[in-house]
Image: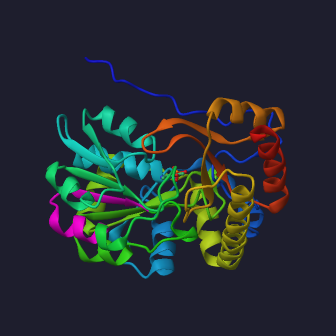
Amino acid sequence: MTAIAYTRYQETPAGCAIDLSDNTNLWGVAPSVAGAFSKFSAQDLSRYPSPYSNDLKRAISEYLSVDESRIVTGCGSDDVLDSAIRSFGSRGDVLVQCDPTFSMIPVFAAVSGVNVTSISPHRSDLVARALAEKADVIYLCSPNNPTGAVLDTDLITAIARQSRALVIIDEAYIDFGGSTSLALALELDNVLITRTFSKAFGLAGFRVGYGIGSPSATRRIEAARGPYKVSTVAERVACAVLENDLRWVHSCVAKTIENRARFANELNDIGLPALPSGANFLMVPVPDGRRFEDGLRAAGIAVRRFDALTEIGDALRISIGPWEMLQECLHALRRISR
Ligand SMILES: *Cc1c(COP(=O)(O)O)cnc(C)c1O
């Protein structure tokens, strides 16, 4: 057996009072969670959940007006992405992604021996490049992690219509900007969108995500995923938030978008302009990532550092949360950049 080149995901740094490193909901947890949590019987917890999360599928189906047969759930959307790549990619197949993008994709591809080809999202020939690779799987993330860039829906549509690949559109940050490709996923059999309860919905600790695509694609992904991936507790809590807390989610999103614009203005003023972002974070190119990260760490602030990104260089990805947190971060950045 050949060893798989395998990267461990970076852990959230300990000992930072202000953690702006992982794009979770920094306004806390939705109001229904505590109540949903207290209602479990011994029976609920000693038995298995439903194998493929029927209650959650029903709740998502109502939320998005999508038939349940088109939904696949998972232990986080990572689980759905992993299962999709495993079920549609075999050894020697090609997965096309933009560079930079979500760092877990090459890890999932490597497990199946799928080769990853990265293309630039900025070139006018993006569609032609994506199609020329004769990919088996195309991964597009919009808004993109870690840049925040929103991909034009016309480009996504052109790629999906002309390719025979499974086109995965990762919408982990769709609540914060950009247009959803949901209609495309309902129209074309080769399109899968993935979403998560970890970011806008504030449930990262519960691990719940889902995908929407054709009934045959979601069934195939579900088979590769296996049963019981969403726990009884996670399913119940996610259903409660969809049922009762959408206004809370929307208010967190509105505050995030407001603070994102304000933070971007302040960053401009201190000479550290951020890239345009449709997500709940800003990517800030810096001259020396390590020096900035260390300086922020010394001030008790965690951010995510990226080294020598294609076309960007060193950069910090900073999550958007309550203004007091961002203000501390600005103070520290101002000090470090002087
Ligand atoms: C956070 C994130 C995910 C997955 O999150 P889960 O917690 O596994 O649902 C997927 N894609 C992108 C781009 C992300 O940033």
Above or below, 89 relative to 25: above
Colour option used: rainbow
Where is 175 relative to 329, above or below? below
Q: Which residues are magenta?
A: 156-170
34 or 96, which is in the foreground? 96
Across and down, in percent, residue 234 comes to 60, 56
Work out which quarter of the rendered image holds the N terminus and state it: top left
Please name whichever residue, 218 or 38, is drawn nearer the observer in this view of the structure.
218
- Report the quarter where the C terminus lies: top right
Q: Residue 130 falls in which quadrant of the image? A: bottom left
Relative to 103, say whether 71 is above or below.
Answer: below
x, y percent for residue 230: 51, 53
Q: Residue drawn at (51%, 53%), measured in percent from left and top?
A: 147
Residue for point 59% across, 56% down: 198
Residue at point 28%, 61% (across, down): 124
Looking at the rendering, which quadrant does residue 167 occupy? bottom left
Where does residue 307 sit, x and y in percent of width and height? 53, 34
Q: Is residue 84 left or right of residue 257?
A: left
Q: Residue at x 17, y 48 (%)?
A: 133
Q: Identify the image quadrant of residue 304.
A: top right
Whether residue 40 can be seen here: no
Residue 164 is covered by the magenta coloring:
yes
Q: Is residue 12 above or below residue 136?
A: above
On the image, the x and y values in percent for residue 20 come to 71, 48
User: Is residue 211 visible to us here?
Assistant: yes
